[in-house]
Every structure is written in structure tokens, then in C-alpha cells.
Amino acid sequence: VYKRQLERCCRSPAAPYDTMTSDAKEYFRKVFDEAEDYDHGVGLFAAFGAHLVDGSGLEPGDRVLDLCCGRGASLVPAARRVGPNGRAIGVDLSPEMVRRSNDALSAEGLAHRAEAVVGDIDALRFADGEFDRVLCGFGVFFSGDAPAMLAGVRRVLRADGLFTLSLFSGLPLWPWLFEVIVRRAKDVPRDEHPMWSADGAAGELRRAGFSDPTRLDVTENVVFASADALWTQLWSLGTRPLLEQMDDPTRQLVRSDIAEHLEAHRVEGGFASTSTATILSARCAA
């Protein structure tokens, strides 16, 4: 249900999934530009970013492109992995996320071999065969035209290049969390993006001319220090569109409901959650 609510913000009411509007892209750019605490202090995406790089088979000297790079969850470990003779480029629609990725690279002493740039994953502006690997951590569903996006990935990959992407297996954090939010949200559509699920993404990859993808499931545990810390994070994630449509009294009810549910997950240091991601890897087919 959470996915369906997010999809409402990805397209105009009558538009198919292969036509994300320019207004929708501008909306998501704004969401992430304003996401001051995106993955800050929790590291959920950073943890899965390391798994994504591990699953990609990156080697020293490789040239890698990271789509929807965010604040560098997979771009930073990719830059470490390719070494001084490799090159890592991140692309994100949000200038603020790009800035934070570049800051993270500089802080790690990796700016000489990696950089993030503003760009649209539906219109990649790189040369044919420029990369050995392409990564995308939890971002393929931001494409407004999945076949065109995948065609672009194939174009910028070398002939036997590998595309590795990650998707959440089910809802991240706690399943009840999104049920609590959606319960008080408005206008929940019933359609789904073709690349939300692992099966859907695998089918799109095959139709786009990639090999049958391999699959790896990985699990991570994270701890939120407080209910306030979780609430702050929710404004920096895909839950923000749901919260923005509510008035203040409704948001306070949601916040109270979340705090009540959290007590069942209390551990030393805060509240523990477990999330599982699926990593798919597919090569450009001959």
C-alpha cells in the first residue's frame, strides 16, 4: 500500500507508468533536496549500499556508474573498490544529494577517482560502452520510462557489462509502520510500477535484452535512538509524500500511533528493525 501511495506522486492521475511527468520529477528533486537527515545517523542505505557493491563484482580498475546515488551509499564503497586506476560516477536528480555525495567522497579522500553529477536516469548522458558496471540502489522505480532507462543502461555498458540493482523485499523497517501512515493518507491508487518487485524487475531486465538475472537476498538490522529520530527520518524518505498530504492534527495522530507501536521493538539504545533487500545482477545479452 505504501508503494501505491508513493506511485501517486510519480505520475499524473491519468498517465501510464512510462510517462513520469516533469512536475513529478521536480517534486522528487525537491523532496530529496530538502531531505536534511536522509539516512543520517541510521545508515540503512549505507549498509545496503555496501552489499550492492559486493554483489556487483566490482574490481580494481573498473569504470562504474551509480544511478540515484543519493548521498553516496553505494558510490563511496564503489570508489574504494575500483582503486586509483578505476573511475566511479554517481548520478542523481537532486543537486543537494549530489553535493552530499561529493562531500562524502572528499572526506574519504576519493574525489580524484569519483564524482557525483546531476542527471536523469531516463536520459543518461554518457558515451556508448563507457562503463564496466552500472549500479542502482533502491532507485529503478524512480524511472518514468523503465524500458528507455534500461536501454540507456545497456547503451552505456560495455558489451558484457553488468547491471546490479537493489530492491526492498517487502516493506522496509517494520510492515506496520507504513500501514499506520497509509491508514490516514488520502487517495491510494491500486496500480504498481513494473519494477517494484524482484520478479517484475527481472522481467523488465529480460525484455530489455539483459541475461536472466542472478538474485541475492541480504538482511540488515538498524536501531533508531528514539521515536523522534524515526519521525525525522520519515520526512527524509519515501514516506514524505504521504505525510505532506496530511494536516497537522492528522500527522500528530500518526506520530502517536507510531510511538505506541515502537514499544514492542525497544532494545538497548533505541528501537530495532530488520529490513531485507534483494540484489539482482544481469549482463548485457549478446
Image (cartoon, rainbow, N blue to C red):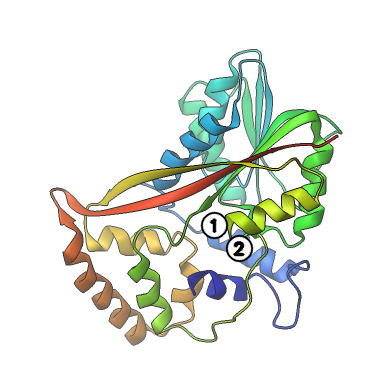
From the top left corner, tell me how far across and down residue 151 is, in percent: 82, 47
Q: Amino acid at mark 2?
A: Phe
- Residue 32's label in the rendered image is 1
**Which residue is rendered at x = 44% and y = 54% of the image?**
36
Q: Is residue 43 visible?
A: no
- Check disc 1 and report its element: helix, strand or loop: helix
Q: Is residue 36 left or right of residue 115?
A: left
Marks 1/2: CA–CA distance: 6 Å
Q: Position of residue 190 (x, y in %)?
A: 59, 80
- Residue 23: mark in rendering: none
- Mark 1 residue crowding within 10 angstroms, few (<14) / some (14–19) / many (20+): many
Q: Position of residue 214 (x, y in %)?
A: 61, 39
Query: Which residue does the numbered mark 2 point to in the structure image?
Result: 28
Examine the image and state in which quarter residue 279 appears. top right
Going by the picture, which residue comes out furthest to the top?
85
**Is residue 237 shown left or right of residue 272?**
right
Quadrant (top left/top right/bottom left/bottom right) for the C terminus: top right
Q: Amino acid at mark 1?
A: Phe
Circle 2 crowding by C-alpha within 10 Å: few under 14, some 14–19, many from 20: some
Q: Are discs 1 and 2 less than 8 Å apart at CB?
A: yes
Mark 2 lies on a secondary structure that is helix
Check the image and report above or below for 282 versus 172. above
